[in-house]
Image: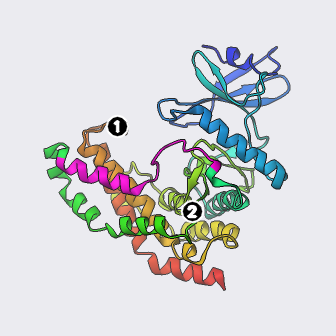
Amino acid sequence: MTTIHVLSHYSVDLSSTAVKPFGNGLINHTWLIDTPTEQFILQRLNERIFKSPDDIASNIEAIRDFLERKHPSYHFVAPIKNKRGATLTHVEEGYFRLFPFVKHSISRNVVDSPKQAFEAASQFGKFTTILHDFPVEQLKITLPDFHNLTLRHQQFVTSQHQGNPERIQQAQHLIEALNNREDILKTFEAIQRDTQFKLRVTHHDTKISNVLFNANDDGLCVIDLDTVMPGYFISDVGDMMRTYLSPVSEEEKDFNLIEIREPFLEAVVKGYYRETQSTLSTIEKEHFFFAGRFMIYMQALRFLTDYINDDQYYPITYSTQNFVRAGNQLSLLIKLESKSAMIHRMLDNISQ
């Protein structure tokens, strides 16, 4: 398959086209397309992960139409329509989308400064806020049970009965530590029953690479909307806390290097709260700290479950990698829990 074959479905000048891989995303394949007059981003959807590509296209088109009517000035990076008028192109090799390249934009893979954390949190908060009145029931579920902590916990419990006995024995200290935090599960299930927690248009993948910046580190817009579904704000805030606050990633083996960088924590809380304070309910505002606990706990459960089940889901490069990842996330969770009072003081100060 050549990208030129896919591009022929679009009204693109193909007289002189340069194609090169773009970014380091682990799910979809992405290329930068240089033509004599414009630049584009071509992306192939991973059908192993996203079973219903048409549902993704439907969601993005519905959001685009809503924003064009209600918030035409919002910078929304929507796929370009092909010659048939569709935003999704299906060829023998798979499903593809073509996006305009955002001029003078920069994508980052690591959060290097509190300003970047603040700007990213502001962009995700703004995205959710301007879609506050979007009829969320119209959105299709592109990844069923993606942030369903009840399911992840059930899988964790099942693994302890059906998984590798040697690995279960090895992981006893992690299992015990996670079992001791079942209050997180109970709070999540209470949130699902609480009408003051609104199902919102939620991004669900708020890592820093899904925000575009300019050269001054000002946030430009949110990208990669494949995981946009109905959800709770705790998913987006929690994922930012999980991935922005520590200077090291979930792959770090030396847990002494894991820490909660307080200026980054403050930046996430202030950035998101600044954009959403008019739409979040009082009880939602009280759950900023829980958001971080929720996402980190869930990821620790998923890593440890996969380890006990002999690594059936997450790719590994060495035998204990998922065990290390689970321990890493538990360490991050413990260190976040020590910041509870700080987060609540921060929210009190912002609200005054």
* Residue 261 drawn at (x, y percent): 50, 67
Q: Residue at x 22, y 63 (%)?
A: 176
Q: Taking 241 as reference, is 296 left or right?
A: left
Q: Secondary structure at mark 2?
A: helix
Percent across and percent down for residue 89 are: 67, 24
Mark 1: secondary structure: loop
Q: Is residue 150 above or below residue 287?
A: above
Tell me the kind of residue under disc 2: Phe
Task: Locate residue 299, reporting x and y percent.
Answer: 39, 53
Instruction: Indicate the position of residue 329 as horizontal and vertical percent values.
Output: 37, 57
Q: Which class describes the residues within 10 Å of circle 1: few (<14), some (14-19), or many (20+)?
A: few
Of labels 2 and 1, earlier in sequence is: 2
Question: What's the image's color scheme?
Answer: rainbow
State whether residue 100 is above or below residue 147.
above
Please tell me which residue lies in front, 68 or 29. 68
Report the residue at 32% width, 55% height from top.
153
- Of the residues shown, which amino acid type is indicated by label 1? Ile
Callout count: 2
Instruction: Examine the structure image and report whether residue 140 is included in the region drawn in magenta.
Output: yes
Disc sitting over residue 316 in the figure: 1
Cα distance between the residues tagged 2 and 1: 30 Å
* Residue 54 lies in the magenta stretch: no
Residue 147, disc: none
Q: Nearer the viewer, mark 2 or mark 1?
A: 2
Q: Which residues are magenta?
A: 138-161
Above or below, 97 relative to 63: above
Residue 39 left/right relative to 331: right
Residue at the image point whose x is 70% and y is 73% from the top: 278
Image quadrant holding the N terminus, namely top right
According to the picture, the residue beneath numbered tag 2 turns out to be: 233
